[in-house]
Image (spheres, grey):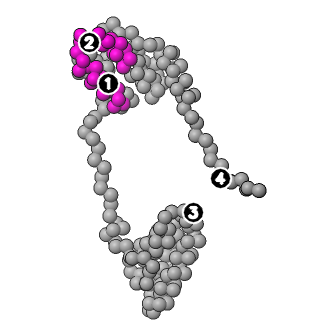
Amino acid sequence: MAEYGRNIQKMVEYIIQIPDREERTRAAYALVKCMEQITPEQKDFTDYKRKLWDHLHIISDFKLDVDAPYPLPSKEQVELKPQPIPYSDNKINYRHYGRNIQKMIEFVSSLGPDHPDLKDMVRVIGNSMKMAYLTWNRDNVTDDVILEQLKELSGGKIDTEGVKLASTNELLQLIKQQQKLQPAAKPQNKKRKKRK
């Protein structure tokens, strides 16, 4: 383990060769103290001492036979790899629009062409798509491209004929306003003030 360095590795190899079990155990306790001094930043973790003893056994390739205060980890347990995370099969055709836009398009396309608010909903979705496009791609985009992609995402169910979207300048102003409203991350002051 690189964080402990070559000297710790050499000491572990030496401790393994000590014939007396009691002396080997005393040396292991002393070595864990050294490891604790080498990695003081880890003291905040829970089960810090147990972690050090586990590392000691890992460094020794599980050959160290001592009376440890914690049960020994098994080699299989340490080398166990996490299961791969299954990703959903729901593909997003245009990633910069996101899943919510796709869900809105599916909802609106299910309403049918005779819905009284259809044009307004298509305009809102189109403006949202244009805003998302401008957020991720600072290139200027035409309304025709956005409306064509909206039609494509709906599977041709939404008619975009006659839909007028907001201008690029208006949407860029909205994006700037949204960015100003988001709270900036405050730098954390590491030094604490002393109380009098």
> Does label 4 or label 3 sit earlier along the sequence?
3
Q: Which residue is mark 3?
A: 41
> Does label 3 or label 1 sit earlier along the sequence?
3
Label 3 sits on a secondary structure element that is: helix
User: Residue furthest toward the right?
Assistant: 196
Task: Report crowding for label 2: few under 14, some 14 to 19, many 20 or more residues within 10 A (C-alpha).
Answer: few
Q: Which residue is mark 1?
A: 104
Q: CA distance from mark 1 to mark 2?
A: 15 Å
Residue range (magenta):
98-126
> Does label 3 or label 2 sit earlier along the sequence?
3
Label 1 sits on a secondary structure element that is: helix
Residue at x 35% of width, y 29% of height: 100
* Predominant SS of the magenta segment: helix
Q: Which residue is mark 4?
A: 190
Q: Which residue is mark 2?
A: 115
> Does label 1 or label 2 sit earlier along the sequence?
1
> Does label 1 or label 4 sit earlier along the sequence?
1
Task: Report crowding for label 3: few under 14, some 14 to 19, many 20 or more residues within 10 A (C-alpha).
Answer: few
In front: 93, or 45? 45
* 40 left or right of 14 in image: right
Looking at the rendered image, the disc whose residue lies closer to the viewer, 3 or 2, is: 2
Residue 85, percent across and down?
A: 31, 49
Residue 76 magenta-highlighted: no
* 92 left or right of 176 in image: left
The amino acid type found where label 4 is placed reads Lys
Looking at the rendered image, the disc whose residue lies closer to the viewer, 3 or 1, is: 1
Residue at x 29% of width, y 55% of height: 83
Residue at x 57% of width, y 63% of height: 41
Q: CA distance from mark 3 to mark 2?
A: 62 Å
Task: Report crowding for label 1: few under 14, some 14 to 19, many 20 or more residues within 10 A (C-alpha).
Answer: some
Q: Is residue 82 above or below residue 165?
A: below
